[in-house]
Image (cartoon, rainbow, N blue to C red):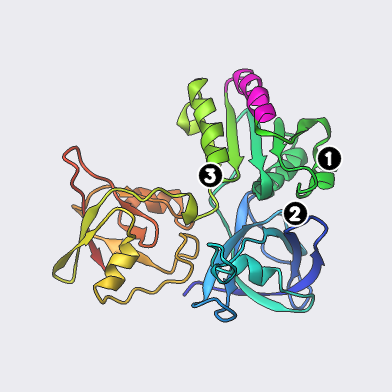
Amino acid sequence: MNARIELVVAAVDDAVPGIRSLTLAAPDGGRLPSFTPGSHLVLDVPAGEGRPRRAANAYSLTGESIDPRHYAISVLRCAPVAEGGTAGGGSAWVHELVIGDRVTATPPRSAFAPVHLATRHLLVGAGIGITPLLSHLRSHVRWGREAELVYLFRDGHGAHVDELKELGGDRVTFLADRAGLAEDLVVRLADQPLGTHLYTCGPAGFMDAVVDLATELGWPSSRVHLEPFGVAALDPGDPFTVGVAGEVLEVPSGTSLLEALEDAGHVVPNLCRQGVCGECRVDVAPGSSPLLHRDLFLDEETRGAGDCLMACVSRAVPAADGRAHLEVTL
């Protein structure tokens, strides 16, 4: 189990329809751990009230990252299954919290940090995907880095608009429709100096469009960085096999390694099932196929070692003959 910190809800802001902004503080009012811009906080979501199991949801931190007095997050309410939606209920739970409620979370983690060697930073976000980019922009302004931000949102539904204006001034461009975004990005992406890095966050279709356009204009993937919302943005993946405790299991496309192991009767600790909490990490033996990491938990060094993966979202990479196999230890 990862270390947890306890926080108390210090303020609630529901000014933007469907979006709740929370200010979370230490119960004793003390300072909280600093974090890298673009980091997220993983809140523990209890079971109950239509939620079949406890979970852990990741939310980007939007406030000051250095020696902060509080953490700030903004959460879009997504309709849970009980209301006919597809969400797990975590965001609905956040929208029920009131000042004084206590929550637990893992300390901030970074999976979407600014590249310090970049000569310029282009930030492109949509909807609630503005949250990690606000953290990036705050850092760039503080350190005097070259940066600009493009934010697409429906009229009246933009998060942190006034804060972005005050923070970024003419570095920030607001857009209200996809057509306008496409026209803007064609020019903007083609007119960036060498060494610029692109960062994007928003709905999967939006990010796909941004990345496709950047690719068409010759941007190398090493200079394009994405912050997905979670497993919903992932494709079903290729099938592979897994060896565990002397048996071999099939992991079909659309089935996670975690689900395949559970279906076979294996007990795997897990929590969020979205690649953010780190609970379902399993060890991978040498000689296994390469790993396709799709989580938000492991750092690059750990991924590079190739000896573990998060069973809820990550998979094996098929060889040229289409086969892939992992040997894992639980």
N-terminal label among 3 and 1: 1
The residue that mark 1 highlights is 165
Q: Is residue 93 left or right of residue 224?
A: right
| Local secondary structure at mark 3 | helix
Residue 172, horizontal then vertical, whole percent:
77, 34
Q: Which mark is residue 275?
A: none
- The residue singled out by tag 2 in the image is 64
Q: Main secondary structure of the magenta part?
A: helix
Q: Nearer the viewer, residue 54 or 38?
A: 54
Report, in whole angstroms, how far the alpha carbon at label 1 lies from the one at label 2: 16 Å
Magenta stretch?
A: 179-194
Q: What's under tag 2, amino acid-wise? A: Glu
Q: Give the residue at mark 3.
A: 204
Mark 2: give few (<14), some (14-19) or many (20+) Cα within 10 Å.
Answer: some
Q: Residue furthest bottom?
A: 48
Mark 3 vs mark 1, CA separation in Å: 26 Å
